[in-house]
Image (spheres, rainbow, N blue to C red):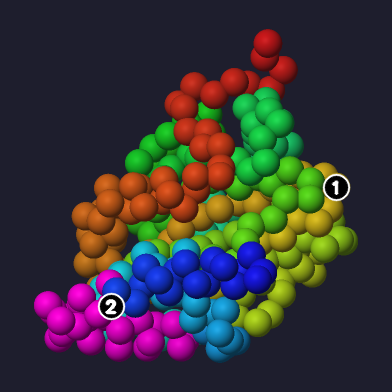
Amino acid sequence: MTKTLRKSLRQLIIAVPLLALGFYFIPILTTIWIVCGLIDVLRNKNKTLSLFRGYFLGNGLFTWLLSPFNLLVDLLCYRNPGVWKLEQFPADYQREVNEVLDVFKARKDEIIADIDANFGTGRRGMYVYQWYGKHKIDNVAEFNKDFKYIKTIAVSVFRGKESTSWHFGPLRLSLRILYNLLPVKAEVFVECNDARNYWHDNPLYIFDDTLLHRSVNEYDGRRYCVFMDIIRPSPFPGLIAGLLAVVSVSVERVNAMFYKNWKMIGSSKPKKAGAN
């Protein structure tokens, strides 16, 4: 018996009794959750057994539990293509994204040096300037303000030969924006909806991270990606921003589990490059 099969059997042994109890005690709610989960997971293109197992029994469990809320959010927002181009955003969203990216481009060497001074020898790190609207590291003055649409500003760093597993993000109130600061022509990419985005071809990638995805770095050196969350384009941007603010405390707790393998660097006084 393979390790994958043993894991699947353990998941089923836990899931089947829980599902039976749900149908017995709260049949309507259980049915609603299953239907919402099916609608949600079917947005993914590659509809395989591993997709459904991962969503309902694996690391997609929180995404499934939040699926009724996420589907309600979809009704309050413009159409979600899954993978986005910057020009699909309203003009004021585009201006804010370009404002932040321009700072990263202009101060790239300084920012990477600061990250290296704090990251050490970890596998994965997150160097955080803002996290769901909460200010963290303050050594880049341009990021020390509240943005209307962008709610997270950070840099994710992978050591050489480091990749994530396939996984789902929890919430669809925001979209994920990634920008590779040092693209190299190698097997370094993000994969979502059955398509790979190689950073050397396209350093900017915007997507709905509740879709199944993974990030791969098969290069020997570190991979540095700007990591931003921007609220979903909507006729009601204030409502979406307000909902994100309300759930941000719970999201932080969920993200603590999602990012358990990451070194989170969020002190307002990080070490500067060259400091002893």
On the image, the x and y values in percent for residue 205 come to 62, 67
Q: Which residue appears farthest toward the left when viewing the image?
A: 25
**Circle 2 is placed at which residue position?**
19
Left or right of 223, for residue 141 = left
Under tag 2, what secondary structure? Answer: helix
Image height of 93 relative to 159, above or below: below
Magenta stretch: includes residue 36: yes
Residue at 67% from the left image edge and 41% from the top image edge: 123
Q: Amino acid at mark 1?
A: Asp
Left or right of 134, for residue 98 = right
Q: Amino acid at mark 2?
A: Leu
Q: Quadrant of residue 186?
A: bottom right
Specify start and end residues of the magenta stretch as a single range: 18-43
Residue at 49% from the left image edge and 22% from the top image edge: 269
**Dot 2 surroundings within 10 Å: few (below 14), some, or many (20 or more)?**
some
Residue at 71% from the left image edge and 31% from the top image edge: 121
**Circle 1 is placed at which residue position?**
220
Under tag 1, what secondary structure? Answer: loop
Q: Is residue 234 visible?
A: no
